[in-house]
Image (cartoon, rainbow, N blue to C red):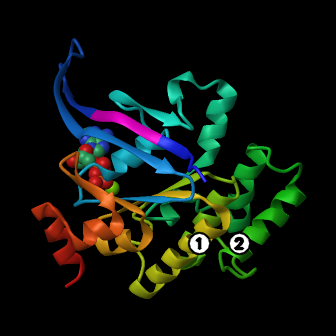
Amino acid sequence: MESKIVISAVNIRKEYVTKRHFITGKVKEKYVAVKLASFDIEEGKTVGIVGESGSGKSTIGEIVGGLQEPSYGHVLYYGKNLKDLSDEEYRDYRKSVQFIFQDPKGSMDPNYRIIDILTMPILTAKIVNNKKEAKNLAEEMLNRVGLDSSVKNKYPGEISGGQCQRAAIARALLLNPKLIVCDEPVSALDISVQAQILNLLRELQKELNISYIFISHDIGVVNYMSDTILVMQNGNIIERGPAKEVLLHPKEDYTKKLIESAFV
Ligand SMILES: Nc1ncnc2c1ncn2[C@@H]1O[C@H](COP(=O)(O)OP(=O)(O)O)[C@@H](O)[C@H]1O
Ligand SMILES: [Mg+2]
């Protein structure tokens, strides 16, 4: 069967203005976070992005997910330039591309219970007809990600980092995403909990045919999760290929160093 491409990044470049003239506003200095990046993400597959801190990984994730606009180049959603999407298509895209971040507690309002944090977005997106249906769906999803019902009435501050990341995954899944941008999703968790979350993400992918962009500084973790790996250094993709190929036969010294530091 022919595979479908969910997202394409086409010649993406991202410049941040770091200094402007204080009167005219003219750009005096800019920093190029991503120099040139192109890649495709197929349905049900994972593209891993690995590289040291500051190499431009998060910037790429944010651009692909519509949180930021590229300075040059464009993003295609099922072959259509984001700029050409109708309002309705754009809403569908924003719902279909979800994020999971390193710090799940930081991405949740501490003043709401987990169940409310999960029901709000599905009510807003009109995925359900009423609050009762939303609650049922949210409870089902919490269950699916391995959280027992005692968690639903707790506040983010009252549960562990691993439990909170599971809740964040549940929240993302409730919107039926095609793609989840996972930005260092296990980097803040204990090693034993990391493996559980990675395995959960893999199971969910098989079951739901979701695509992932999996971002990490740890090439071991990226390899475990990914079909294809992009290696980033200083805003450039310096090496890419099937995960096994990159791990077993790295071409660049930088990639070799990442491998050495991951498997000491
Ligand atoms: N809003 C911003 N303004 C200026 N520079 C930024 C901004 N966001 C990120 N950067 C810089 O761009 C580079 C890439 O950042 P990022 O994509 O977060 O890298 P990574 O996720 O690989 O650590 C870093 O040097 C960072 O300091
Ligand atoms: Mg980052």
Q: Which residue is mark 2?
A: 142
Q: Quadrant of residue 184?
A: bottom left
Q: Is 63 covered by the magenta stretch?
A: no
Please report the residue visible at 58 percent of the width from the left and 62 percent of the height from the top: 110
Label 1 to label 2: alpha-carbon separation: 8 Å
Q: Amino acid at mark 2?
A: Leu
Q: Is 11 covered by the magenta stretch?
A: yes
Q: Is residue 119 above or below residue 61?
A: below
Crowd tier of the residue under label 2, counting other residues whose Cα lies within 10 Å: few below 14, some 14–19, many 20 or above: many
- Can you name the residue that lies furthest to the front here? 1
Q: Residue 91 appears at what percent x and percent y?
A: 65, 35
Query: Could you say whether the residue bearing mark 2 is in a helix, strand or loop?
Result: helix
Q: Amino acid at mark 1?
A: Arg
Question: Is 182 in front, or is 5?
Answer: 5
Q: Which residue is mark 1?
A: 166
Q: Earlier in the sequence, mark 1 or mark 2?
A: 2
Please report the residue visible at 41 percent of the width from the left and 32 percent of the height from the top: 69
Q: Residue 176 appears at what percent x and percent y?
A: 69, 54
| Residue 84, visible in the rendered structure | yes
Q: Quadrant of the C terminus?
A: bottom left
Q: Is residue 122 left or right of residue 264?
A: right
Q: Is residue 139 above or below residue 2?
A: below
Please report the residue visible at 61 percent of the width from the left and 69 percent of the height from the top: 206
Q: Residue 143 appears at what percent x and percent y?
A: 73, 76
| Magenta: main secondary structure | strand
- Can you name the residue that lies furthest to the left here? 253
Please report the residue visible at 62 percent of the width from the left and 60 percent of the height from the top: 209
